[in-house]
Image (cartoon, rainbow, N blue to C red):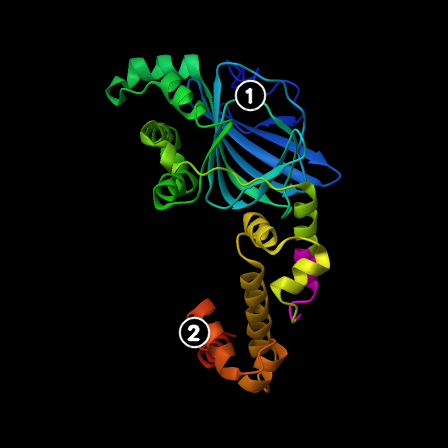
Amino acid sequence: MHIFSQYERAFQGYHFEASSVNDEEMLLTVENESGRGTMCCYEALPGALLVYHDFKMGSCYQKVEPVRGFLQINHCRSGCFEFELAGGARSFIGEGDLAVNNPEILTVVNSRFPLRRYEGIMIMLELESASEWLKQNASWTDLDLYGVKEKLKKYGDVFLMRANTSIGHIFDEFYQVDERIRRPYSILKIAELLLYLSLVSKEEQRHLPRFSPQVVEGTKQVYAYLSQNPLSRLTLAELSARFRVAQTSLKSCFKAIYGQTPCAFVRAERIQIGARLLVEDPEMTIQEVALQAGYENPSKFARAFHAKTNETPFVYRNRRMVGD
């Protein structure tokens, strides 16, 4: 049986290059002017398609038609997924986040990868087949997939849970499973995930913040500016005024896309500059490195460096130099 025979409806209208890896696994490739992405797919159990995403591109959006009888679960391991809703509002799913959506309800009109990379897992459940298999082979779980779908459906078009320890525990093992036991282990992990979702409450849901196109584009301009000018002394208020984005919106949108606030991003960039100088120019004093990294006070640089690397600049330099 073709591995996608049960899922063709969910992928209708989506164009990709498909190649078989083996009898149980397929590799789907998406390529356009923005880059290339791959989806490594295999059926963990009848009605449960497990897809490993690895995209290095700006967008892979293709319009698909609404389809009944499925539940789609997505976990972001790294990168960021941006989707645009009818009306122009945009939302983001970031590192560690879990999103469950109902393919019967499609409100997305475009999508992007603002960091030009995205790695994660999608589980596409064809409810009729998966329910029947679980009933016959894992009745002890007492899982009601239709009940899970209806429960999450009540909470909105996309059910989102921000990164937490429980989600991390479940999905870390998906990514690290030994190939020799992948199928039976994946069955157990999917059952664990579904049991977890059957217990979550509305209070545990995190509504996706939605941003206007103007806020998103302004925030991306701030990111580009800070990336090119990590030693800039502009305050958040000054960035807000310069790029015409309200401070609160800028801070919130920046964190949604890039996983940290503008201030934290600048600190990380400066520490990277300092770390590079410590190794590349061993003749520079710590004070000189601090100045080059944007710190007028070497003590502040040392504290910030230790907070980021868990080492003092002196220890970091010596360890790297000895290692070389």
Q: Tell me residue 130's x, y (percent).
A: 40, 17
Q: Label the magenta part by its dominant secondary structure.
A: helix
Q: Nearer the viewer, residue 271 or 56?
A: 271
Q: Tell me residue 85's x, y (percent).
A: 63, 31
* Residue drawn 59% across the image and 52% down it: 254
Q: Secondary structure at mark 2?
A: loop
Farthest residue to the right: give it: 33
Q: Residues within 10 Å of mark 1 (few under 14, many from 20)?
A: some
* Residue drawn 38% across the image and 22% down it: 148
Residue 224 among magenta residues: yes
Residue 76 among magenta residues: no
Q: Nearer the viewer, residue 61 or 204?
A: 204
> On the image, which quarter does residue 164 sit in?
top left
Q: Tell me residue 88's x, y (percent).
A: 67, 34
Indicate whether 159 appears above or below 125. below
Left or right: residue 142 compared with residue 226: left
* Residue drawn 44% across the image and 77% down it: 312
Residue at image mark 1: 105
Amino acid of disc 1: Ile
Q: Residues within 10 Å of mark 2 (few under 14, many from 20)?
A: some
Q: Secondary structure at mark 1?
A: loop
Q: Which mark is residue 311?
A: 2
Residue segment shown in magenta: 222-232
Left or right: residue 135 compared with residue 118: left
